[in-house]
Amino acid sequence: MIRTRFAPSPTGYLHIGGARTALFSWAYARKHGGKFILRVEDTDLERSTQQSVQAILDGMQWLGLDCDEGPFYQMQRVERYQAVAEQLVNEGKAYRCYCTKEELDQMREAQRARGDKPRYDGRWRDSLQKPPPGVKPVIRFKNPEAGEVVWADQVKGPISISNGELDDLVLLRGDGVPTYNFGVVIDDLDMNITHVIRGDDHVNNTPRQINIYKALGATLPKFGHVPMILGHDGERLSKRHGAVSVMQYRDDGFLPEALVNYLARLGWSHGDNEKFSRDQLVEWFDLAHVSKSPARFDPDKLLWLNQQYMREAETPRLADLVQPFFAADQCSTDDGPALYAVIDLLRTRASSLRELADAAVFFYRPLEASAALRAQHYGADVRPAVEDLYKRLSSVVWNRAAINDVIKAVVGAHALKMPKLAMPLRVMVTGSTQTPSIDATLELIGKETVLARMSAELKQFPA
């Protein structure tokens, strides 16, 4: 059975790159009827926090990336790593190194001075000297000194790295906590991981890990290293490009299915399909179509996708999701038109839930027009037409068709073009020039509210 895993370090939030790695691993397992395991690699004791653990769990839950096993925590498995490290020492495949930090620093400085690559020189590898007192040793792996490490990467193709490029890496630190390259191998072995799908920043770690697998006589998993994500300008992805917490996208008004769809298209494709469901992703996903080149993050494309999903979302769901944005704006939807009707009127105009809420506020409370808008649209020449419209609307039966007829009649009676009346009307009633069809907007706001706002704003017109 295929078993994949996502193994983040809880040193920050779940970001776009990590979320895509999790999605690819999840989709591959689901495609093949396998298992998806969540593991928290919390051995960085200085930087790991419970807050970050929760942020990762929250992000996974919001995206719908459910795990079959876990989360497992490395710090709960320390005795297991220590036991395997001791096993390797006893078998002559690892050794204790008593170098102090100062000795290691001096070693690297001397290597740099000679123009050599800084690396551990193996001085304790076969040493017979007596261990110095008071030094807590690390356990280092006896990396093969000759030959090459070769593997068929599921994304990048064949890769080979000379063992001469690798030094004797630390397996266990002096405090008994495993290093990344050791802990990950033992975890993947114990959890029977068959496919390791991760970012290509781990390519250099893979030969080190393969050598540990071989020293343990273990079967290798298949490795697939997916390309990094760049900003739209080709630079390394950063906060200014959108490399923020996955939960920030929720807070900015994105739907999880839109972000999942977009992440799937970052470095993977199925023909020309831009928009597809989670079920289609599972049906289509493979590693053969993961690009070898870096993907570029395009916030405009993400917004477009989100807009498509918002158009298709059920109105009650959108109403629930948009409520926190009204609450943050201290706007109550209790008094005013039915929220479902407002959403159905506005949904095609909004790219996010935040935009939807911002566009809907004027239905529930008056928004004062800016001085610039008033100066642009409240002309003395149009005031007679606006006053006429106010009188006619006061006596009309309040529905969209009747409102439309009245507006057209006033435009004709005063020999105006439609925008000449419609624009100041929008500003008077909504505080903005950007609204859906004005007759539909007025109908929803309600007769009493429309007339009250028009009456107040008429005082702002020049005589």
Image (tube, helix red, strand yellow):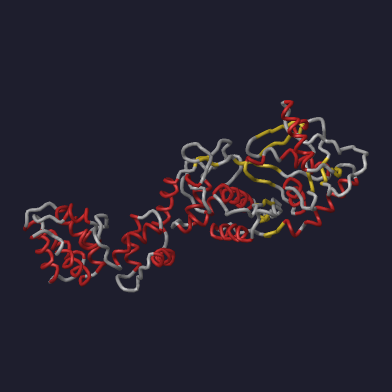
- The residue depicted at 17 percent of the width and 61 percent of the height is 404
Left/right of residue 345 with respect to residue 1 in the rendered view: left
Residue 221 placement (x, y as % from top left): 73, 45
Question: Which residue occupies the foreground of this view, 431 or 298?
Answer: 431
Image spot of residue 173 (x, y percent): 78, 49
Front one among 83 and 351: 83
Q: Is residue 427 above or below residue 174?
A: below
Residue 57 lies, in percent from the top left, at: 60, 60
Q: Find residue 405 and report its image quarter.
A: bottom left
Question: Is residue 116 shown left or right of residue 197?
Answer: right
| Residue at the extreme top | 114
Q: Which residue is nearer to you in this view: 228 or 37?
A: 228
Q: Is residue 107 above or below residue 303?
A: above
- Looking at the rendered image, the quarter that the C terminus falls into is bottom left
Total marks placed: 0
Nearer to the camera, 126 or 208: 126
Q: Residue at x 63, y 59 (%)?
A: 53
Residue 49 image position (x, y, % from top left): 64, 58
Q: Quadrant of residue 223?
A: top right
